[in-house]
Image (cartoon, rainbow, N blue to C red):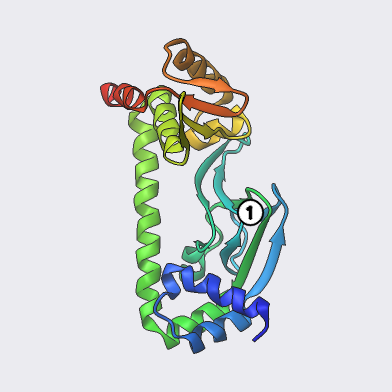
């Protein structure tokens, strides 16, 4: 078996929807999956485009976002290896409901709508898996709507920084984590504008809750930062 096909099977095996497929079935799907490579910042598809199929992230990361008429973005999620993207429009026949871009150098596996439909017909359990994935996405979107509707920019920013801390590392100065490349990108994650992000970051630093060195976030006391979040709720 060629190395490329083996890698594709290993990637597909990580996808929740395909977890119950046999090796033969995975191989069948892998033979029809088309590898596609994207540079960081390269568009994968735009919101409103007809859906040709779904994507599976093999390496790298994909940013899924919505854009307003003025060009303002709101990030819905960032999907890494083993994640599937665009299951819903493949399933319901609609257009892509959001746009996607490669967050870094990324390799994807493209599965056409026709091949996916054939798979669902042959393996009805896959349909239930799709519903579970789409349900999880719906819950996440409801959470985003709730956050945007009922919380302040400060609260959303603190919540985002706390999530970053979970991926950071402990040092003698506290927890260190990497910030997004720009305040504009950070703003797109929490549904606001760059100016408000900059202002609130400055306030958090003045209060001693965080320190920023370049693009490194330092949180001296995570429990204290979480306390600020809880007191605002």
Q: What percent of the width, then of the height, locates residue 186?
A: 55, 32
In the structure shown, which secondary structural element does the residue marked by tag 1 occupy?
A: loop
Q: Name the image quarter holding the C terminus.
A: top left
Q: Which sits in the foreground, 32 or 99? A: 32
Number of marks in picture: 1
Seen from the viewer's position, the closer of residues 3 and 43 is 3
Position of residue 63 relative to residue 15, above or below, is above
Identity of the residue furthest to the top in this view: 206
Toward the viewer: 129 or 165? 165
Tell me residue 223's x, y (percent). 31, 26
Please provide percent x and percent y for residue 5.
Answer: 63, 79
Left or right of 150 in this view: 115: right
Crowd band around label 1 with a 10 angstrom C-alpha radius: few (<14), some (14–19), many (20+): some
x then y, percent, for residue 172:
46, 26
Q: Quadrant of residue 193?
A: top right
Q: Residue at x 54, y 60 (%)?
A: 81
Is 175 drawn above or below residue 118 in the view shown?
above
Among all residues in the image, which is located at the extreme front? 172
Q: Residue at x 39, y 63 (%)?
A: 133
Q: Please name the residue shown 67% across and 76% down the image.
A: 4
- Vertically, is 159 above or below 90? above
Quadrant location of the N terminus?
A: bottom right
Query: Mark 1 highlights which residue?
Result: 46
* Residue 220 falls in image quadrant: top left
């Amino acid at each position: 078996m060629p190395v490329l096909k083996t890698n594709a099977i290993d990637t597909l095996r990580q996808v929740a929807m395909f977890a119950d497929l046999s090796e033969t079935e995975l191989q069948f799907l892998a033979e029809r999956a088309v590898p596609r490579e994207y540079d960081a910042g390269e568009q994968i598809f735009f919101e409103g485009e007809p859906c040709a199929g779904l994507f599976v992230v093999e390496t790298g990361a994909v940013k899924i976002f919505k854009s307003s008429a003025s060009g303002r973005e709101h990030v819905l999620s960032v999907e890494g290896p083993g994640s599937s993207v665009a299951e819903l429009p493949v399933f319901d026949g609609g257009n892509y409901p959001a746009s996607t871009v490669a967050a870094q150098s990324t390799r994807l596996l493209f599965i056409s709508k026709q091949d996916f439909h054939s798979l669902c017909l042959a393996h009805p359990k896959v349909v239930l898996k799709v519903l579970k994935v789409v349900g999880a996405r719906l819950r996440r979107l409801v959470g985003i709507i709730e956050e945007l509707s009922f919380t302040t920019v400060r609260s959303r920013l603190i919540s985002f920084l706390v999530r970053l801390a979970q991926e950071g590392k402990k040092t003698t100065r506290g927890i260190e984590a990497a910030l997004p490349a720009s305040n504009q990108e950070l703003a797109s994650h929490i549904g606001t504008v760059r100016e408000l992000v900059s202002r609130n970051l400055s306030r958090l630093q003045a209060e001693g809750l965080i320190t920023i060195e370049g693009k490194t976030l330092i949180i001296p006391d995570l429990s204290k930062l979480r306390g600020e979040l809880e007191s605002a709720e």
